[in-house]
Image: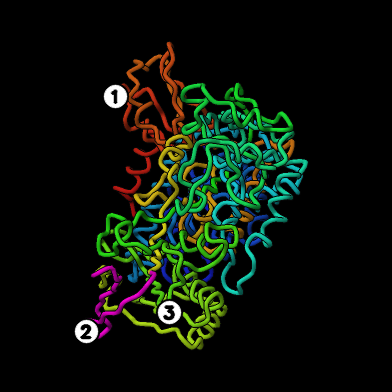
C-alpha cells in the first residue's frame, strides 16, 4: 500500500504565524516525497479544526500524519485520538514541534522558518518508518495495601474502605495510632489527641472492608500496578485478640522488667504488657526477646494467671498472601538521635529531654501521670525549650523539619498551664510558623508572664553543660554576644528523619529513598504523593516532615489517586511503546536484567523475556544489549536514523 502522508501546520494563533513563514512551509512540504496533502490551520487543537482534521484524514485516505505545531507533551494524545476516530492507527503520527523549538526561541523569522523546514522534514522521514502498535489491556484488582496505621494510614484506609474496597493495613507495632496516639494535646488549640483520633482508630478496627494486622510486616511483593501479590509476615499471636479483655492480670505476675519504649525509656514495663492506657487494640502483647519462656522455656506465669485462656505460648508465625492493585506507604518518621551531638549533653546530663520524651512526661498516661517533674521528682523552676537541635546544620541535618517551632510553643503553653510559676526560655534561630493559627499561638505564648525568647546567631550556636550539679546553657545571641543561664530542664526539638524501616521497604517496593530515610516523590510539585514506582504512593511523614492535617490530607490524596486508576471490573491499558526481544538474536547474557530500572526483564532458558506490564519503554535495555536483540517499539534505529537524516539536510 503506498504511503500517503498528510502534513497539517498549526498557526497556533500568533504564536507560530508571526514567527514563521507559514506559506513557505506549505510550499516546502508539498514538495516532500510521499506527502499527499498539506493544510494550514488557525488552531488545530480547537474542536472545529480537530473535526476538520478527522474529515481530511478519512476523505484523503491518509496513511500517516505529521502535525507541525506545539510540543507533543501538550497535544500528542489529542491528535492520536483524532487519528483513531478516523480509522488510522494512532502511532502513525509524528509531531514536529515548531512552536517551542522555533517560534519561541528564534527571533529571526527567516532562520526560524528554515529550522521549521528541517523539523518537518525529519518528522516526514520518520513517520514513514512508524509501524502500527496495539495497546494491550489486562484486568486489575481494586483493593489496596496500606503500610502503617498512623493518622495518614488510617485516614487513607477509611476513605478506601468507605468506597467499598478491601483494605489491608500492615502495622509493625502491637497497636495503631502512631505517634499521635501518644500525644497529650495537639497544636494549635490544645485539643486532646486521643479524644480526637480514638473514633478514627475504633472505626478502622471495626470496618467491614478493613483488615488491620498489627505486629506484621511486608515480606515480599511481586507484580505491577493493578496486579500486586504481597506477602505479609504476621508475628505469632501469643495473645488471642478475641479472648483477651486487657485486664492486665498477666502483666502483674510477669517476673521480667525492661525499659518501656512507649514512654521513651523513662520507665519500665513487663515482658508481657499493654503498650499504654488507651492503646487500641487494648490487649496484651508478649515481647519474645525478653520473655523467659521464649529464651529458656522455664516460665508460664502469664498463661497460668490469665482467667480467660487468652495466652497461647505455642502460637506460630503466619504468612498471608494477598493480591492488591496498589500500595500506600504511611510508615511515619523518627526523630534524629541527638546523643552524638555532644554540645546538647543529651544522655549525659540529667533532665535533658527530646521532644517525644517531654510529650510522655506531660501526658496523663505517661510515667509521671501528667505532672511536670524532674528525674528527682521535684517540679522544675526553669525550663529551656531549644529549637533546631541537629537541624539546619551540615554537622547533622541541613533541612528544617517545619513542625518543631509549633510544638515548642505547644510545650510552652502546656508547661505554663501545669505549673503557672515556671520560667520558660525559648531558644531559636528563626521561627518557622506558617499559617494564621501558628501566629495566634505565638502571640498567646509571648503574652504569658514568665516566657522569654532569645534568638541564636546560628541554629547550633549553643551548648548545654553541667557544673557543680547545676545545668547551664551558653549561647551566642543574634549580635554574637555570649549569653549564659542556668535551668532545671531542657527540651530539645531534634530534626525529623525517615522511619527505621525505610531503607528495607525501599528495596522491597523498589522505590527511591533519600539519605535521610524519606521516600522520594515522583515529582515534588506535580505528584506529591506518588512514589517513584507506579502503583505505590506515600503519605504523611514517610515522605517528609509534616503536620497532622497535612498527613491526613496526603493519605486522602493518595487514596483518591489510587482509586481513580483502580476501578472495579476495569482494565488497565499497558504502554504500547515498550521494548521487545528477538529471541533468535538473544544470547542470554543477562546484561539487560541488571540495567532495567523497572525490573521488567526475566532471564529464562530461551533468553531474556520482557514483561509487558512492567516495561515503561525507557530504552535502557535496548542501549545496553550487546547483540542488538532488543528493540524499543516506536523508537527503532531506522526511525531515529530517518529523523536525524531529515534534520541534517534540507532542500529549499
Q: Earlier in the sequence, mark 3 or mark 2?
A: 3
Residue at 55% from the left image edge and 33% from the top image edge: 224
Helix, strand or loop: magenta stretch: strand
Label 1: few (<14), some (14–19) or many (≥20) C-alpha neighbours in 10 Å: some
Label 2: few (<14), some (14–19) or many (≥20) C-alpha neighbours in 10 Å: few
Left or right position of 579 against 88? left
Viewer-closest of 444 and 155 = 444
**Mark on residue 626?**
1
Viewer-closest of 295 and 231 = 295
Viewer-closest of 293 and 530 = 293
Reading the image, the residue beneath label 2 is: 481
Q: Nearer the viewer, mark 1 or mark 3?
A: 3
Label 2 secondary element:
loop
Q: Are marks 2 and 1 in contact (CB under 8 Å)?
A: no
Reading the image, the residue beneath label 3 is: 424
Label 3 secondary element:
strand
> In what quadrant of the picture does the N terminus appear?
top right
Q: Which residues are magenta?
A: 468-489
Q: Does 481 appear in magenta?
A: yes
In 3D space, how far apart are the residues under numbered discs 1 and 3 (Cα atoms)? 69 Å
Left or right position of 375 against 137? left
Q: Does 613 appear in magenta?
A: no
Q: Earlier in the sequence, mark 1 or mark 3?
A: 3
Residue 404's quadrant in the figure? Answer: bottom left
Residue occupying the far left of the picture: 481
Q: Earlier in the sequence, mark 2 or mark 1?
A: 2
Amino acid at each position: 500500500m503506498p504511503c500517503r502522508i498528510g502534513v497539517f501546520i498549526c498557526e497556533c494563533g500568533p504564536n507560530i504565524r508571526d514567527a514563521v513563514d507559514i506559506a513557505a512551509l506549505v510550499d516546502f512540504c508539498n514538495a516532500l516525497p510521499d506527502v499527499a496533502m498539506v493544510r494550514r490551520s488557525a488552531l488545530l487543537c480547537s474542536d472545529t479544526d480537530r473535526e476538520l482534521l478527522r474529515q481530511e484524514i478519512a476523505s484523503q485516505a491518509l496513511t500517516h500524519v505529521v502535525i507541525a505545531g506545539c510540543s507533543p507533551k501538550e497535544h500528542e494524545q489529542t491528535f492520536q485520538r483524532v487519528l483513531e476516530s478516523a480509522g488510522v492507527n494512532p502511532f502513525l503520527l509524528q509531531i514536529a514541534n515548531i512552536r517551542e523549538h522555533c517560534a519561541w526561541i528564534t527571533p529571526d523569522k527567516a532562520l526560524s522558518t528554515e529550522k521549521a523546514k528541517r523539523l518537518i522534514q525529519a518528522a516526514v522521514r520518520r513517520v514513514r518508518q512508524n509501524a502500527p502498535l496495539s495497546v494491550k489491556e489486562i484486568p486489575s484488582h481494586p483493593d489496596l495495601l496500606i503500610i502503617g496505621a498512623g493518622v495518614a494510614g488510617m485516614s487513607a484506609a477509611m476513605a478506601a474502605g468507605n468506597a467499598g474496597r478491601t483494605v489491608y493495613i500492615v502495622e509493625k507495632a502491637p497497636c495503631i495510632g502512631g505517634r499521635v496516639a501518644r500525644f497529650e494535646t495537639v497544636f494549635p488549640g490544645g485539643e486532646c489527641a486521643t479524644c480526637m483520633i480514638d473514633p478514627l482508630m475504633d472505626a478502622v478496627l471495626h470496618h467491614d472492608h478493613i483488615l488491620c494486622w498489627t505486629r506484621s510486616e511486608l515480606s515480599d511483593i511481586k507484580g505491577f500496578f493493578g496486579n500486586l501479590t504481597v506477602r505479609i509476615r504476621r508475628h505469632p499471636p501469643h495473645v488471642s485478640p478475641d479472648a483477651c479483655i486487657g485486664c492486665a492480670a498477666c502483666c502483674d505476675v510477669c517476673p521480667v522488667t525492661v525499659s518501656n519504649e512507649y514512654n521513651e525509656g523513662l520507665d519500665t514495663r513487663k515482658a508481657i504488657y499493654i503498650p499504654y492506657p488507651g492503646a487500641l487494640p487494648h490487649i496484651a502483647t508478649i515481647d519474645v526477646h525478653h520473655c523467659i519462656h521464649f529464651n529458656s522455656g522455664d516460665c508460664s506465669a502469664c498463661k497460668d494467671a490469665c482467667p480467660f485462656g487468652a495466652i497461647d505460648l505455642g502460637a506460630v508465625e503466619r504468612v498471608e498472601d494477598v493480591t492488591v492493585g496498589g500500595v500506600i506507604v504511611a510508615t511515619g518518621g523518627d526523630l534524629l538521635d541527638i546523643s552524638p551531638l555532644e554540645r546538647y549533653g543529651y544522655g549525659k546530663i540529667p533532665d535533658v529531654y527530646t521532644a517525644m520524651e517531654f510529650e510522655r512526661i506531660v501526658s496523663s498516661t505517661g510515667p509521671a501521670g501528667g505532672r511536670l517533674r524532674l528525674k528527682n521528682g521535684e517540679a522544675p523552676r526553669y525550663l529551656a525549650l531549644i529549637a533546631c537541635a541537629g537541624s539546619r546544620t551540615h554537622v547533622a541535618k541541613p533541612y528544617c523539619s517545619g513542625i518543631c517551632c509549633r510544638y515548642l510553643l505547644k510545650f510552652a503553653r502546656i508547661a505554663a498551664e501545669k505549673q503557672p510559676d515556671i520560667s520558660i526560655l525559648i531558644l531559636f534561630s528563626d521561627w518557622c510558623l506558617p499559617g494564621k493559627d501558628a501566629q495566634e499561638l505565638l502571640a498567646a505564648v509571648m503574652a504569658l508572664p514568665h516566657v522569654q525568647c532569645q534568638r541564636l546567631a546560628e541554629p547550633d550556636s549553643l551548648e548545654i553543660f553541667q557544673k557543680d550539679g547545676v545545668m547551664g546553657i551558653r549561647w551566642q545571641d543574634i549580635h554574637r554576644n555570649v549569653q549564659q543561664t542556668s535551668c532545671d530542664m531542657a527540651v530539645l526539638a531534634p530534626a525529623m528523619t525517615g522511619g527505621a524501616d525505610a531503607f528495607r521497604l525501599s528495596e522491597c517496593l523498589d522505590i527511591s529513598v533519600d539519605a535521610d530515610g524519606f521516600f522520594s516523590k515522583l515529582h515534588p510539585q506535580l505528584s506529591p504523593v506518588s512514589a517513584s514506582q507506579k502503583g505505590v504512593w506515600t503519605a504523611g511523614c514517610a515522605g517528609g516532615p509534616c503536620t497532622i492535617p497535612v498527613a491526613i490530607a496526603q493519605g486522602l490524596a493518595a487514596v483518591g489517586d489510587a482509586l481513580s486508576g483502580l476501578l472495579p471490573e476495569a482494565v488497565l491499558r499497558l504502554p504500547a511503546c515498550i521494548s521487545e526481544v528477538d529471541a533468535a538474536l538473544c544470547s542470554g547474557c543477562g546484561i539487560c536484567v541488571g540495567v532495567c530500572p523497572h525490573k521488567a526483564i526475566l532471564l529464562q532458558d530461551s533468553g531474556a523475556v520482557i514483561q509487558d506490564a512492567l516495561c515503561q519503554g525507557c530504552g535502557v535495555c535496548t542501549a545496553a544489549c550487546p547483540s542488538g536483540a532488543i528493540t524499543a517499539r516506536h523508537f527503532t534505529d531506522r526511525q531515529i536514523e530517518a529523523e536525524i537524516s531529515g534534520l541534517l539536510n534540507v532542500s529549499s
